[in-house]
Amino acid sequence: MSENVLGEWLAQAAEALGVDAPDDGVRDAVLDLARDVAHNVARPGAPLTAFLLGVAVGQGADVQATSAELSRLATRAE
């Protein structure tokens, strides 16, 4: 998926939800987390872990720190 298509999709989805689209740092953190979970835990775990990250962030967690911690956890999983 090209950056332009992804950016347009995120803008449309964010508008539909009434939230701000993620900036590049947040987008990269979530994509890195999804990659780490998909490769080290299980592919279906990637979107579910991203959902859990969203719940945590919605409750006040820092997206960068929380995604980094989840990535560390995923890369230690066997």
Image (cartoon, rainbow, N blue to C red):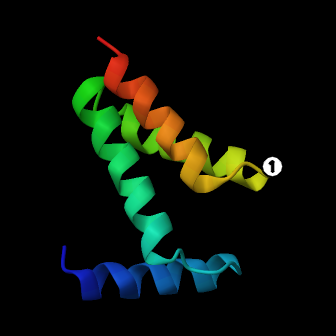
The residue under the point 49% across, 34% down is 70
Q: Position of residue 61 (x, y in %)?
A: 73, 48
**Amino acid type at image mark 1:** Gln
The structure residue drawn at horizontal position 70% and vertical position 52%, both measured from the top left corner, is 57
Of residues 71 and 56, which is closer to you in this image?
A: 71
Instruction: Determine which quarter of the picture holds residue 10.
Output: bottom left
Query: Looking at this rendering, what residue extends furthest in the right direction?
Result: 59
Q: Is residue 8 above or below residue 52?
A: below
Q: Residue furthest left?
A: 2
Please, is residue 70 above or below residue 64 in the view?
Answer: above
Q: Which residue is at a point 40% across and 81% down the rendered structure image?
A: 9
Q: Quadrant of the C terminus?
A: top left
Crowdedness near tag 1: few (<14), some (14–19) or many (≥20) residues, C-alpha within 10 Å: few
> Residue 6 appears at what percent x and percent y?
32, 78
Give the residue number, with chain letter if any, for mark 1.
59
Report whether 33 appears left or right of 52.
left
Which corner quadrant holds the N terminus?
Answer: bottom left
65 to 18, vertically: above or below: above
Q: What is the number of callouts on the image?
A: 1
Q: Is residue 44 left or right of residue 39?
A: right
Q: Nearer the viewer, residue 17 or 60?
A: 60
Residue 75 in the figure: left or right of residue 22:
left
Identify the secondary structure beneath mark 1.
loop
x, y (%) of residue 65?
58, 46
Q: Which residue occupies 42% across, 36% down?
A: 71
